[in-house]
Image: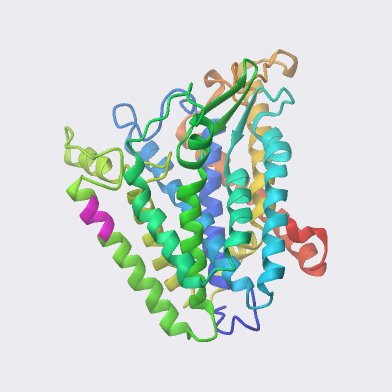
Amino acid sequence: MTENNTSQNFRVSSIDMARGIIMVIMALDHARDYFHADAFVFDPTNLEKTHTALFFTRWITHFCMPTFVLLSGVATRISLLRKSKKELSWYLFTRGIWMIVLEFTVLRFGFFFNFYFDVTILSVLWLFGMCLIILSALIYLPNKVLLSMGLIIVVGHNLLDDIAVEPTNLWFAPWTILMRVGFLAVTPGIAFVVSYPIIPWLGVMLVGYGIGSWYSEQVDALTRQKLFLKTGVVCLIAFVVLRFINVYGDPGPWSTLETRWFTFLSFINTTKYPVSLLFLLMTIGPLLILLSILEKINTKVLQPLRTIGRVPLFYFILHFYLIHAIALISFMIKTGKPFSEIDLHFAKSFGGITPEGGHSLAVVYLFWITIVLIMYPLCKVYDRIKSQHPGSFLRFL
């Protein structure tokens, strides 16, 4: 159902549906991580080794992280329809702390199924936690200021691509956490992997917060849909133009390869780690167009996606446990190894799984569909329980 009166109905169906679509796609990427035979052998976007089906299996999931971060900013701005800035600031701060705690405990165990803490990935929940904490202070600034800050970061952060800080430098850890991806060794046995640096993604969240004002009472539904559509088209045009020029916006320029098709793949093969301007234009453009379209759709067919999109954190954490558990069982069946012989140390395996226990891409898709079908009724039940207890601790999950 299209929700025009956001002051009375604070959940926006188009946002929930968009998030639900992306979360289903996200599960494909994580299924590939745990089930595919080549998941630990080479990058699926490495054009020297990949094939078309594998490339797009990975490429389509590039839309997930920008969607999560941008819509988080949008949803935060919509929250001001029912909360004061003081209330919202405290909520963002406490939720940010909670997400960081979940990253280091519940999600980390879901990744590796071990308590060694030899390697910890600073991944999605860590990033969201840090960005929400920062946003909890920034929301006192005018909306236009935050939107401008976000745009400056998104458009300009690639100007710093050539700054290299050596691991021996005192600034290596903060620079990596804020602007780069990398491996931070604390001791010989303890390390952190930074996969999502804070500053570039904070820019995306600030942009989302800025355009979240399009859901205010002053903007009617038709105007909002046009704004999303036009902005999305502008993003895609900017992507094509900047990518074709091949000068700025991505540290990995495209190149002419042996076939036109692989040249095209090179053109759309932008950089996610750390995220580049062109990566964001390529992914956020279609997202904005999708938001414009979904707001016009009134069908029960998308209700399951809306349900999943209403409980994103619950889905995100639980689907890792489900995928990892099924993958580990599959690995033991295929290799004949009992659980007692599986080494869960990060240096030896990824959560106990090594390449010889992997499957073909077709089998990965079967596992992915199975995972989503299992997750939907669980999300439906949890959404109902959460709706029945709106003021409880469940609002944090």
Q: Left or right? Give the position of 391 relative to 55.
A: right
Q: Determine the residue positioned at 52% across, 63% down.
A: 18
Q: Is residue 162 magenta?
A: no
Q: Say which quarter of the image contains residue 252.
A: top left
Position of residue 296 measured from the top left corner of the image (x, y, whole percent): 47, 78
Q: Determine the residue positioned at 50% across, 86% down.
A: 218
Question: Considering the image in quadrants, where does the C terminus appear?
Answer: bottom right
Colouring chosen for the image of the structure = rainbow
Question: Considering the image in quadrants, where does the N terminus appear?
Answer: bottom right
Position of residue 352 measured from the top left corner of the image (x, y, whole percent): 64, 22
Q: Main secondary structure of the magenta part?
A: helix
Position of residue 295 measured from the top left corner of the image (x, y, whole percent): 49, 75
Position of residue 330 measured from the top left corner of the image (x, y, whole percent): 63, 27
Instruction: Tell me if residue 285 comes above or below residue 318 in the rendering.
Output: below
Instruction: Tell me if residue 81 comes above or below residue 199 in the rendering.
Output: below
Decide which of 197, 49 is in the foreground and name it.
Answer: 197
- Residue farthest to the front? 170
Q: Left or right? Give the position of 357 relative to 159.
A: right
Instruction: Tell me if residue 389 comes above or below residue 296 in the rendering.
Output: above
Decide which of 130, 321 is in the foreground and name it.
Answer: 130
Q: Determine the residue positioned at 67% across, 49% down.
A: 374
Q: Which residues are magenta?
A: 238-242
Decide which of 396, 297 is in the foreground and name it.
Answer: 396
Q: Is residue 370 visible?
A: no
Q: Determine the residue positioned at 74% across, 57% down.
A: 396
Q: Is residue 395 visible?
A: yes
- Residue farthest to the top? 341
Instruction: Tell me if residue 69 comes above or below residue 260 in the rendering.
Output: below
Q: Is residue 241 magenta?
A: yes
Q: Say which quarter of the image contains residue 337.
A: top right
Q: Left or right? Give the position of 168 relative to 389.
A: left
